[in-house]
Image (cartoon, rainbow, N blue to C red):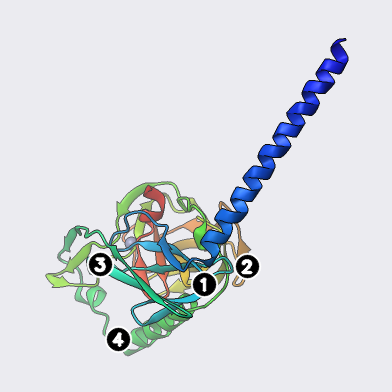
Amino acid sequence: MRIPLIIQLAASHRISRYIRATMLFILMITGYSGTVFANQIEVITESPGQGSMIIGKLSGNGRVFVGSQELQLTRNGYFVFGVGRDAPPEVTINAKFNTEEKSLSIPIKSRHWKIERVNGLPPSKVNPKSKAVLARITKEARLVKAARNRESEMEYFKMKFIMPAKGRISGVYGSQRVLNGEPKRPHYGLDIANKTGSKVIAPADGVVSLIHSNMFYSGGTIVIDHGYGISSTYIHLNSISVKNGQKVAQGESIGTIGATGRASGPHLDWRLNWFNTRLDPQLLIND
Ligand SMILES: [Zn+2]
């Protein structure tokens, strides 16, 4: 009587699976309600350093602040912020719940920055003085600032980012530039050198918030909004193949590498921002 035995076994197997699933379900329900109603702040990003984008999660019904700045929460309680190149060794996140307040201090690893000295540059390239050029620089800076300050509720910042181009890393975030002996603003991008025309792709999903064919410093420029203040910037582009407001998917072509604007050779300068704080895009790739 082989067949009934098999049926019996299958049936008992189904029953035990059903019981196990039920028990698991009960555990999930109790565990789940336990986390939802406990007021808690949690940092998800592991060992953040200067220039890091930091993702966290709030459990319970409350508001989250870093310093005096309130962070917007996603539907599921996630928040994101960034710490700049010169961030102090500790940053405190405060959460205000209905009846209690909680704070969480997170250590920020200090990093060492390279110093790049460049001498013998024509003074006009180091310090542009023409009124028309200065007006153009101001106008363009305002456009970029507006794109970076957009507030949107997209959760693409949580994606695992990929490199936006292939090539040799020819410059890193944070290096201090001393031009003709004069300390200038640090370099905030990751430079990826490759031939003019090499493909540039979106490292994560987002919406294009700015395109410009030729800015004074940055040449062909794209800004992509990944949500909640996180945006990424692509400069010195030779061509742009996306439109303002366009939704882009990770891996999708957005343009090509060039040497437009103030660039010494063809490369992509890739940047990451949390509103006006400049972050290190390489930290999204290295972990
Ligand atoms: Zn650069």
Q: Residue at x 43, y 83 (%)?
A: 142
Of tags 2 and 3, the one toward the viewer is 3
Of tags 3 and 4, the one toward the viewer is 3
Disc on the earlier residue, 2 or 4: 4
Q: CA distance from mark 3 to mark 1?
A: 22 Å
Disc 2 designates what residue? 246
Of tags 2 and 4, the one toward the viewer is 2
Q: Residue at x 49, y 76 (%)?
A: 62
Q: In this orientation, which residue lies closer to the viewer: 26 or 263?
A: 26
Disc 4 designates what residue? 130
Q: Are marks 1 and 2 in contact (CB under 8 Å)?
A: no
Q: Amino acid at mark 3?
A: Glu
Position of residue 211 measured from the top left corner of the image (x, y, whole percent): 53, 71
Of tags 4 and 1, the one toward the viewer is 1
Position of residue 231 measured from the top left corner of the image (x, y, whole percent): 47, 68
Q: In this orientation, which residue lies closer to the viewer: 278 or 139?
A: 278
Q: Are marks 3 and 4 in contact (CB under 8 Å)?
A: no
Disc 1 designates what residue? 73
Q: Amino acid at mark 1?
A: Leu
Instruction: Determine the secondary structure under disc 1.
Output: loop
Disc 3 designates what residue? 90
The local crowd at label 1, few if under 14, some if 14 to 19, many if 20 or more residues have their Cα within 10 Å, is: some
Position of residue 202 measured from the top left corner of the image (x, y, whole percent): 53, 57
Of tags 1 and 2, the one toward the viewer is 1
Q: CA distance from mark 3 to mark 4?
A: 42 Å
